[in-house]
Image (cartoon, rainbow, N blue to C red):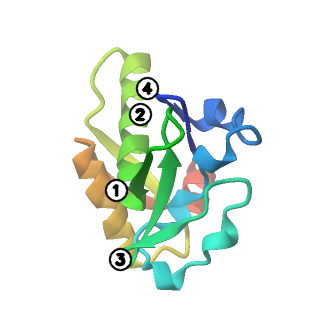
Amino acid sequence: MLSWLDSEECHRIQAKSHLVRNAKNKVAYFRDFIGKKYSKINPTNSDNSAHQIEIDGVPSDNLQQVDEETVSTVTITELTTRHLIQLTDSGSDFLGCKVTGAVITILTQFSNTQKEALVAPAKSAELEVWQTINEQVAGILA
């Protein structure tokens, strides 16, 4: 989950606090849309968040800026890249060294196209994907 309040970008738990008061600038469940064409998604599926719009056949979001007049359009790929950068930075801060690679969990129903669409933003975030693994398998292994 990502949220924007004024010029601040919030992730995960911090973004949840903006659920009600800033729903137009909150994007939830964007992982469900990665690698899919807009015509293949249900854009009203994102309860309490900005609904996806179509830009060149790709699911995207319009986000209101601080001045409340400027609207910026962000694709699902850009959102994923931003989220992975934030996760990498957070992990690097915790470990005390730069995180350069990761194993990424994916939904069981992800197609090969969706897996590839997830690896591309990881590369943009300077993150080497060592492996993708289904969430259920990762849960069992943990």
Q: CA distance from mark 4 to mark 3?
A: 28 Å
Give the labeled residue for mark 1: 131
Mark 1 or 4, nearer chain start: 4
Q: Quote the CA–CA distance across marks 4 and 2.
A: 6 Å
Which element carries disc 2, helix, strand or loop?
helix
Amino acid of disc 1: Gln
The local secondary structure at tag 4 comes to: helix
Q: Which residue, given by chain and number where applicable, does mark 4 sit on? A: 90
Q: Mark 1 against mark 4, which lies toward the viewer?
A: 4
Mark 1 vs mark 4, CA separation in Å: 20 Å
Mark 2 and mark 4 in contact (Cβ < 8 Å)? Answer: yes
Sort mark 1 into few (<14), some (14-19) or many (20+) by Cα contacts within 10 Å.
few
**Residue lying farthest to the right in this orientation:** 20
Q: Is residue 97 above or below residue 56?
A: above
In primary-sequence order, the first of circles 1 and 2 is 2
Say what secondary structure mark 3 lies in: helix
Frontmost of labels 1 and 2 is 2
Q: Residue at x 54, y 76 (%)?
A: 109
List the single residue furthest toward the bottom. 39
What residue appears at the point 49 percent right and 85 percent down from the top-left corner? 39
11 sits left or right of 17 in the view: left
**Residue 71 versus residue 60 in the image, above or below:** above
Where is residue 34 shown, x and y percent of the image?
44, 66
Instruction: Tell me whether the residue at label 4 lies in contact with that at label 3, contact meaning CB atoms closer than 8 angstroms.
Output: no
Mark number displayed over residue 86? 2
* Residue underneath mark 3: 113
Q: Position of residue 76 (x, y in %)?
A: 42, 60
Query: In this rendering, which labeled residue sits more in front, label 4 or label 2?
Result: 2
Q: What residue is at 77 percent from the left and 42 percent from the top? A: 20
